[in-house]
Amino acid sequence: MSADASEVTVVVITHNRRAELLGTLERLAALPERPAVVVADNASGDGSADAVAEHFPGMRLLRLEDNHGAVARNLAVRHVHTPYVAFCDDDTWWEPGSLPRAVTLLAARPELAAVTARIVVEPEGREDPVVTELRASPLRGPDWLPGPALGSFLAAATVLRTAAFRDAGGFHPALWLGGEEELLATDLLSRGWWLAFAEELTVHHAPSTARDATARRVLGLRNTLWFTWLRRPLLPAVRRTCYLATTVPRDTASLRAFAQAAAGVPWLLRVRAPVPGFVEEQLATLETAQRAGSSRRYVG
């Protein structure tokens, strides 16, 4: 094992996707770098945890009693003892060589919190459309970044500095799942960290069929609204809310999302902490670019 590979731990979260999970873990176990792996099972009822224990006894397994969604990553990182942590889902896996390259990029840049990989969709072997948006990020960063500066990241395709993740508090428990990266990324930026896209890193994604697209849309839209009111100044938050209200599909799912978001107003107002001006400038720039992109259509 190379010195670089020994400095990164892979964290995988899962819920009721036994077949996909075992396939992902087989690929991770076959990596020449042989990284440490922590699997956080979100109270699966399909025997996922028992299968991991049987087939991959060398991996750290967390049998969670409840479905914590994305927050399961926080619980898994408590068991990470390496300076870097690579996240992936039960239907994504890292290409050989990418993890040590990510460690090299981060180790050489102390102010860089995370590097996000290009995503290849399987079995077609095509790039995910979001990669085009990552490459074309409108944010300006220092010349020492390994690629375009980012305002957020994709958890299933990102290697983070463990200390930065912990310092920013990890994923917010209230968001649970769905666009949960945006809030954490903004809190990292507010602390002076940088995020970047790294072309030389690759993650493969074989989208699971075991997903409720409509439920994901509800959570994604609700969390976008919550993030907006947690971190954006008043006028940008009002403008963003009005824009979403007039552009999302006029259906039951959107109504549910807005109703859930409204129900959170009391706690949002208690903990609301608008970002510094330099971060708001970045968020405003990203918002303009997102309106022209295809990654946030809230359909399904």
Image (tube, rainbow, N blue to C red):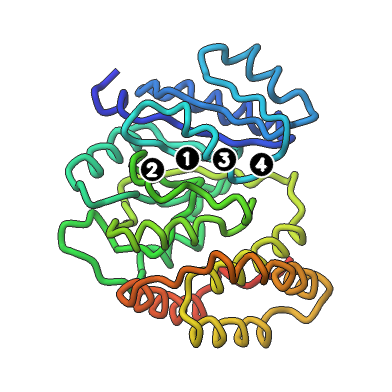
Residue on which disc 3 sits:
89
Lateral position of residue 10 relative to residue 208, left or right: left
**How many tags in the picture?**
4
Q: Residues within 10 Å of mark 3 (few under 14, many from 20)?
A: many
Type of amino acid under label 2: Val
Residue on which disc 1 sits:
87
Q: Identify the mark nearer the N-term, 2 or 4.
A: 4
Q: Name the one closer to the observer, 200 or 288.
A: 288
Tell me the distance, in whole angstroms, between the alpha carbons under discs 3 and 2.
13 Å
Q: Identify the mark nearer the N-term, 3 or 4.
A: 4
Tell me the distance, in whole angstroms, between the alpha carbons under discs 3 and 1.
7 Å
x and y percentages locating residue 299 in the rendered image: 70, 70
| Tag 1 secondary structure | strand
Q: Name the one closer to the observer, 23 or 296.
A: 296
Q: Are marks 1 and 2 in contact (CB under 8 Å)?
A: yes
Residue on which disc 4 sits:
68
Lateral position of residue 61 relative to residue 216, left or right: left
Residue on which disc 2 sits:
159
Type of amino acid under label 4: His
